Image: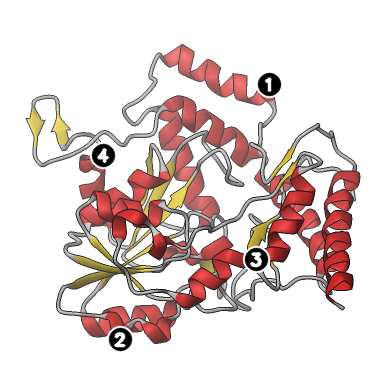
């Protein structure tokens, strides 16, 4: 592995900051044009380049990944009940509630951590209008089964692909599945625009409707044709995105190196997420599953004691959220959420830093095993 710059604090992730000279050149273009928002030149360029890099069509850049989901619901006319997963970041659920939609949770597969398609049909009611699955940690859902269920029951599908940047399924972009797929470009993601996100639509007419919607419903200097909101990406966000995209292959390479090192070192000590064998890995997260919550807490405590901060993605299970009670208990999601920990992974981790993380985790695991024997 390549030694890199160390820092005193090791967090679960660190914002990737691209070459400053390159970034300044993009920003110089903004100053030259004085065009800072409203579908500027850099937003247009980033849209074209992302469609090419991701191999998708009908991509719309927006100001953040949360609004990406909300705009997708609105454009697709989602009403009433929506089937979704309890194992995700809170925005997957909160966007539904914010849009006055009722999330209906379907439990997850205990190995892939994605929504279990075998449980979906049993939760469909006459009020159900859509399915919102999540490609958890960039691991592809069983998109073919989900699509068949959606078609059978006349439901829309919106995939939360916040973790799925660059992931391919059977050689094609994973983001090409569904009526829409959303992305987050938050600073914590492997590709980011500081804040930001995108929606990939199946149909061009939905893209055109969304373009109006994210700009207040305005279609000309003196014309407002529908209800809208301000969800546009600005030029400074696009400048960061273009600069990060210039270096994306290096980002993937370094993440792959770290991810592989973790896997090789920890394969006999913890459980891993079962990856979909037909999809690629973007190495965006490194989740590990412990035997029980007690062991997780012991490992986390030992790491934080030396300024290493892993994170309990995703905890708590979303079916436990106070503002959604009462809920049917999603037992698998609650169990996985209580035992899963994401270890630090980002370009910039040094050999010594990652080795330290691994050593502490194994030592704590072995100590716990010795106490129990």
User: Can you tell which mark lies on residue 293?
Assistant: 3
Q: Earlier in the sequence, mark 4 or mark 2?
A: 2
Q: Which residue is mark 1?
A: 21
Q: Which residue is mark 4?
A: 214
* Image quadrant where one finds the C terminus: bottom right
User: Can you tell which mark lies on residue 122?
Assistant: 2
The CA distance from mark 4 to mark 2 is 35 Å
Task: Please rate how many residues cluster around mark 4, counting C-alpha atoms within 10 Å: few if below 14, some from 14 to 19, many from 20.
Answer: many
Q: Position of residue 103 (x, y in %)?
A: 29, 64
Q: Earlier in the sequence, mark 1 or mark 2?
A: 1
Task: Please rate how many residues cluster around mark 1, counting C-alpha atoms within 10 Å: few if below 14, some from 14 to 19, many from 20.
Answer: few
Viewer-side residue, 193 vs 118:
118
Q: Position of residue 51 (x, y in %)?
A: 46, 51
Q: Earlier in the sequence, mark 4 or mark 3?
A: 4
Q: Position of residue 155 (x, y in %)?
A: 24, 74
Q: Earlier in the sequence, mark 1 or mark 4?
A: 1
Q: Left or right of 207: which side holds 84?
A: right
Q: Secondary structure at mark 1?
A: helix
The CA distance from mark 1 to mark 3 is 46 Å
Mark in the foreground, 1 or 3? 3
Mark in the foreground, 4 or 2? 2
Residue at 70 percent of width and 28 percent of height: 19
Mark in the foreground, 1 or 4? 4
Q: Earlier in the sequence, mark 3 or mark 2?
A: 2
Q: Secondary structure at mark 4?
A: loop
Q: Are marks 1 and 4 in contact (CB under 8 Å)?
A: no
Q: Are marks 3 and 2 in contact (CB under 8 Å)?
A: no
Q: Left or right of 134: which side holds 11?
A: right
Residue at 17 percent of width and 64 percent of height: 80
């Amino acid at each position: 592995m390549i030694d890199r710059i160390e820092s005193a604090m090791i967090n679960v992730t660190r914002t990737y900051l691209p070459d400053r000279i390159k970034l300044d050149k993009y920003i110089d273009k903004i100053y030259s044009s004085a065009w800072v928002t409203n579908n500027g030149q850099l937003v247009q360029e980033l849209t074209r380049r992302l469609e090419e890099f991701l191999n998708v069509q009908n991509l719309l850049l927006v100001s953040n990944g949360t609004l990406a989901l909300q705009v997708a619901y609105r454009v697709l006319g989602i009403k009433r009940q929506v089937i979704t997963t309890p194992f995700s970041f809170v925005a997957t659920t909160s966007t539904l509630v914010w849009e006055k939609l009722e999330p209906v949770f379907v439990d997850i597969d205990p190995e892939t951590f994605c929504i279990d398609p075998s449980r979906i049909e049993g939760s469909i009611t006459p009020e159900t209008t859509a399915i919102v699955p999540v490609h958890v940690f960039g691991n592809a859902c069983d998109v073919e089964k989900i699509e068949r269920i959606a078609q059978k029951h006349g439901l829309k599908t919106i995939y939360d692909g916040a973790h799925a940047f660059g992931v391919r399924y059977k050689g094609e972009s994973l983001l090409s599945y569904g009526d829409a797929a959303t992305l987050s470009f938050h600073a914590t993601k492997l590709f980011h625009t500081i804040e930001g996100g995108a929606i990939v639509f199946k149909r061009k007419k939905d893209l055109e409707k969304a373009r109006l919607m994210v700009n207040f419903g305005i279609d000309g200097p003196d014309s407002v044709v529908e209800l809208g909101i301000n969800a546009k990406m600005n030029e400074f966000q696009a400048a960061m995105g273009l600069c990060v995209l210039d270096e994306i292959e290096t980002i993937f390479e370094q993440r792959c190196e770290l991810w592989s090192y973790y896997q090789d070192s920890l394969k006999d000590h913890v459980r891993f997420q079962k990856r979909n064998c037909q999809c690629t890995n973007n190495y965006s997260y490194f989740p590990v599953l412990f035997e029980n919550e007690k062991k997780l807490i012991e490992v986390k405590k030992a790491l934080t004691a030396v300024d290493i901060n892993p994170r309990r993605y995703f905890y708590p299970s979303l079916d436990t959220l106070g503002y959604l009670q009462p809920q049917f208990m999603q037992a698998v999601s609650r169990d996985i959420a209580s035992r899963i920990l994401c270890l630090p992974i980002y370009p910039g981790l040094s050999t010594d830093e990652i080795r330290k993380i691994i050593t502490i985790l194994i030592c704590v695991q072995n100590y716990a095993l010795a106490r129990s024997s």
